Image: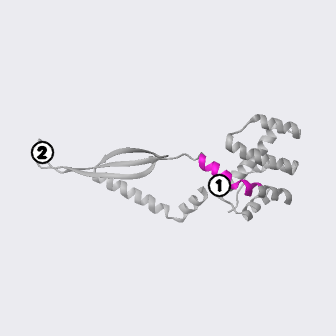
Amino acid sequence: MLLVLSDEHKEHLGFLPEVDSVVVSEFGRIAVEFLRRGTNPKIYEGAARKLSADAETVQHGVEGLMYLLTESSKLMISEVDFQDSVLVLGFTDELNQLLLQLYLEHRKEVRHILSELTPSLPHYHNLEWRLDVQVASRALRQQVKPTVSMKLHLEDRGEKSAKVLQTDPATLIHLIQELEKALAELKTTHCRRILRNIK
């Protein structure tokens, strides 16, 4: 799978051929560091002074490199696909190899950082249910009023919680049908392609 870069990102990465390969390696280290700890404008200013360039240009170069590394790592692009993706930038072979080396060195670390940034959502742990049927009351001697009570146990980062839900059978049947439709939709090729790109 090839990584498609917008014109803006190509423009940001256009600064890299103007600097030495040691500087590009340092930019790669800074990009991974920024993913870990966040950006620091002082580093941009210091690098801009050393390179006698505009701080905004240096910032765009590092951010473009950061985007290239994160998107490539997120999609787990192979070496060949990464080289083909970078080839459209028109860089020299030496710079392309340097970018590939940066990607291969930091791929696992970037994926680890990205996995820590994703929000943790509560997930299913257990379900208890009970069917209650009211068959008569003082006002009505013969009636059938069924209700389904459910206790949904959830787990989030080791902490357990419980939610109590109550519904009538018709709503429960409708809910089951909608969830089955969603599961069937997950099996379509369109949805599988989207999920493959998200991972």
Looking at the image, can residue 165 be seen?
yes
Quadrant where the image shows the C terminus:
bottom right
Q: Which residues are magenta?
A: 102-116
- What crowding class fits label 1: few (fewer than 14 Cα within 10 Å), some (14-19), or many (20 or more)? some
Quarter-of-image position of residue 194:
bottom right
Q: Measure the C-alpha gap from mark 1 to mark 2.
A: 62 Å
Specify whether residue 104 is painted magenta: yes
Label 2, on which residue?
Answer: 140
Q: In the displayed structure, does residue 133 sit left or right of residue 9? A: left
Q: Earlier in the sequence, mark 1 or mark 2?
A: 1
Q: Is residue 149 left or right of residue 119?
A: left
Where is 145 relative to 196, above or below?
above
- What amino acid type is highlighted by mark number 1? Lys
The amino acid type, in three-letter code, at marker 2 is Leu
Q: Position of residue 85 (x, y in %)?
A: 74, 59
Q: Secondary structure at mark 1?
A: helix
The picture places residue 61, in percent across and down from the top left corner, at: 79, 45
Q: Tell me the SS state at disc 2.
A: loop
Magenta region, main secondary structure: helix
**Magenta stretch: includes residue 106:** yes
Quadrant of image for the N terminus: bottom right
Q: Is residue 190 left or right of residue 174?
A: right
Q: Dot 2 surroundings within 10 Å: few (below 14), some, or many (20 or more)?
A: few
Residue at the extreme front of the image, as rendered: 158
Q: Which residue is drawn at the image coordinates 63% and 51% (left, top)?
A: 112
Q: Look at the image and name its color scheme.
A: one colour
Residue at horizontal 68%, vertical 44%?
A: 35
Asked whether disc 1 touches disc 2, contact meaning CB atoms under 8 Å apart, the reply is: no
Of badges 1 and 2, nearer the viewer stands 1
Which mark, by number, is residue 74? 1
Residue 14 in sight in this render: no
